[in-house]
Image (spheres, coloured by chain):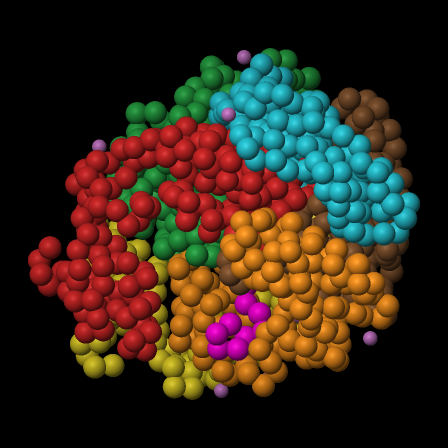
Chain colours: A red, B green, C orange, D yellow, E brown, F cyan
Amino acid sequence: SKLSQQEIAKTDDHVLCLETNLDDATGQQLAAAIKGALELGAKDAWAEPIIMKKGRPAYKLCLLTATTQQELFASFLFQHTSAIGLRVHPLQREIMERKLKKVKTPYGEVGVKELTYHGVKKFSVEYDDLMKCSQKTAEEPEKIRLAALQEIENKGE
Amino acid sequence: SKLSQQEIAKTDDHVLCLETNLDDATGQQLAAAIKGALELGAKDAWAEPIIMKKGRPAYKLCLLTATTQQELFASFLFQHTSAIGLRVHPLQREIMERKLKKVKTPYGEVGVKELTYHGVKKFSVEYDDLMKCSQKTAEEPEKIRLAALQEIENKGE
Amino acid sequence: SKLSQQEIAKTDDHVLCLETNLDDATGQQLAAAIKGALELGAKDAWAEPIIMKKGRPAYKLCLLTATTQQELFASFLFQHTSAIGLRVHPLQREIMERKLKKVKTPYGEVGVKELTYHGVKKFSVEYDDLMKCSQKTAEEPEKIRLAALQEIENKGE
Amino acid sequence: SKLSQQEIAKTDDHVLCLETNLDDATGQQLAAAIKGALELGAKDAWAEPIIMKKGRPAYKLCLLTATTQQELFASFLFQHTSAIGLRVHPLQREIMERKLKKVKTPYGEVGVKELTYHGVKKFSVEYDDLMKCSQKTAEEPEKIRLAALQEIENKGE
Amino acid sequence: SKLSQQEIAKTDDHVLCLETNLDDATGQQLAAAIKGALELGAKDAWAEPIIMKKGRPAYKLCLLTATTQQELFASFLFQHTSAIGLRVHPLQREIMERKLKKVKTPYGEVGVKELTYHGVKKFSVEYDDLMKCSQKTAEEPEKIRLAALQEIENKGE
Amino acid sequence: SKLSQQEIAKTDDHVLCLETNLDDATGQQLAAAIKGALELGAKDAWAEPIIMKKGRPAYKLCLLTATTQQELFASFLFQHTSAIGLRVHPLQREIMERKLKKVKTPYGEVGVKELTYHGVKKFSVEYDDLMKCSQKTAEEPEKIRLAALQEIENKGE
Ligand code: NI
Ligand code: NI
Ligand code: NI
Ligand code: NI
Ligand code: NI
Ligand code: NI
Ligand code: NI
Ligand code: NI
Ligand code: NI
Ligand code: NI
Ligand code: NI
Ligand code: NI
């Protein structure tokens, strides 16, 4: 279960960032590795363009994982990409407390995260919900997002 | 007070690198966050292009802060960007000892940092000073930089 | 119908490249625009990281379209992204002649394009087919690709 | 006068894109060139990360100019950057018709562009105005943008 | 013979820019293609990070060639990379007039290009020569470049 | 001796990642620093495009070094680049066990690494060997790589 879909009360946790520089992987393989790592339970996965030795245009592949999953994801990367080594950053995460709610708009219902951290409070509307409502109603996602935020404001939250 | 404007004697210090991956921020917001973080006292701030899950072209926003300022800048990022979580790298910095001086050139006076580290010595001319002299004299900044470095060499420093 | 899925005999055609620099779009919106443009019939769609005025980390969104579809895709971009203008490059494309075939491997059947151009001949295995066979057999896509290319070579093609 | 600040009735115009690959310029110089080109009247200016020959991490500098200004901006680039050559793309631009208006929000007045193109209609709030209102009222720019768009909708536009 | 090593009198010429988006090439192959294209006579060659369909982290490979060499370099790309199509931009180049000269410095002799264009005049020191002198004398390349430019200025050129 | 050329039995080691953001270095200098660091014994070296303060298009230069070499490489960076400070990440590396072998193909002999990690096993063919065989035989490197992998499979390894 990924950060963006969880109800979370504590605002601090510890994770690993696994990184590997790949000058012998294709874009097809990189995209498959990002998708596969998320399906296997990585908290996040992304790629960064880099320039490696011998002038090679390459990508750095990065995974964010639980501290207990170093070997699981090292095995994943070694099996499914051309990586033969990887670097491990132990990191702390600072995260906002979150409560999940449903908000009704003229275009359909959308999920909203109420986010708080030491006096900061904000709302984040689920993008996938916006896209679903948008496909049903042919209204732009931004318009639906505005409607949801307006609805929250009207309720005095 | 940022590193590049300080007179510094010790060559080692400890800092935090705060990072957050943003697929729901605009370039306008990212540029404002970089500027705002520096105004609030961040030691450095920058953005890196990344490719996030679901094929999203995104940016990683990075802040370098004092070790005592984790909550200050977490609050800043949560309030002023779409971030809902961030990663914290505790880092050590290796920095050159620096002395600030003023150097006269035919195009005006410019600030110069004399930088030393274990037998390495070099000089760095303040870019903003070069730009000011350039605007007054219509001479290219590079030409003025050369004149300043020539002046330093002539003085036998 | 996109280039990569077509049987093509002629090796020259004319297309438009539509480009727009976006400093007020999010990564979520950019990914949705790339997907939406392809669904609407764009021949290709991609994004490039750029640095815009006022220090804004941004992306250039690029679409490749038929020469008759300038207004269709301009309308698409104006409606579904924050773009308020776009640049049009009329381009010629040089493309390899292609014949589609099916190749049997121990891991399942995969599509292969036989590609020729003025004496150059090569084969390209469909990545999506490799992934499907890989999911069924738990064998790595690269291994399956090798098997398909080996099969083609054995047949003396 | 740049595109984003103009009231424009026609939706087609012709421009030049001047490009130069720079492996011998610094980031300080690139940022100064982008700023300087815009001050000299370029319609747009940006940089793209590229990897040049001999494995050099570099940037492509791009200017959008009037068709009559090729020599003016070639001279600018040759004088103010390390460029010794540049490439010229003659381009057509497709742009939305725009009308400028002022909209009152609880946080101050902001400029808004009403944009139309073949049946597409949208509104774009001036980011610099949002920032000014934000600084006066300590309200987030996004909140002010929402208020402006709400105001426009309420007026039935 | 590439632009950067030529003595050139005219300041205008016509070239082709060949571009291909590669999501199935590795960094090793991209670096080899850049090197190979230059050896075959391309005027320039470089790569740009892009994000392609299906969220693939990829690179755009770009070649600058003579207008008569479209088929030569299309064949090169089709044979030596995974490209199956490419886009052709006919471009004009604006280039500075250049005279080559040798300049003596305390660290050895270096090549210098005297560059002129409509009243703009500047000098560019050959980087490879700087590196050679640097390796012989253990002096930094920047220091040697300054010495060369100083020498030119002293001669009243 | 770099990771990619070593026979390695243990699968865990500790390294430093040294990073510095450079807005006052050119691409020529960055490429020279990557090459120079590797010659001095860095385990890896690469550059990442970033956007720094004041809208500067820049690069982050990264070195991977032994834990005992912090001062050596800090001195290298301070002497050979414009860096005046750098950040130090102590990292752990997870690496595959490797055995080096030679494999004969119809196009010449190539080095192959047999790589293992907790039940994962794979083979990586030396790219430089592929290029050498390719230059001698005019066969594509990919074809030679396939032949080597086929040879390994036939031997039942
Ligand atoms: Ni990065
Ligand atoms: Ni707290
Ligand atoms: Ni770290
Ligand atoms: Ni020390
Ligand atoms: Ni034609
Ligand atoms: Ni680009
Ligand atoms: Ni063009
Ligand atoms: Ni032909
Ligand atoms: Ni026209
Ligand atoms: Ni029209
Ligand atoms: Ni002229
Ligand atoms: Ni183990």
Along the horizontal axis of the image, is A89 left or right of E118? left
The quadrant of the image that shows the N terminus of chain F is top right
Q: Is residue F154 above or below residue B4?
A: below
Q: Can residue C48 be seen here?
A: no
Q: Kindly identify the residue that appears in the image at 27 percent across and 33 percent down.
A: A12
Q: Is residue E112 above or below residue E70?
A: above
Q: Kindly identify the residue that appears in the image at 32 percent across and 78 percent down.
A: A138
**Considering depth in this image, is A1 or F53 the residue closer to the camera?**
A1
Along the horizontal axis of the image, is A53 left or right of A32? right
Along the horizontal axis of the image, is E63 left or right of D121? right
Q: Kindly identify the residue that appears in the image at 18 percent across and 76 percent down.
A: D154
Q: Kindly identify the residue that appears in the image at 19 percent across and 74 percent down.
A: A106
**Considering depth in this image, is C47 or E133 the residue closer to the camera?**
C47
Q: Position of residue E138 (x, y in %)?
A: 78, 22
Along the horizontal axis of the image, is B55 left or right of F78? left
Q: Which residues are magenta?
A: C38-51
Q: Can residue C144 be seen here?
A: yes
**Considering depth in this image, is C16 or D41 the residue closer to the camera?**
C16
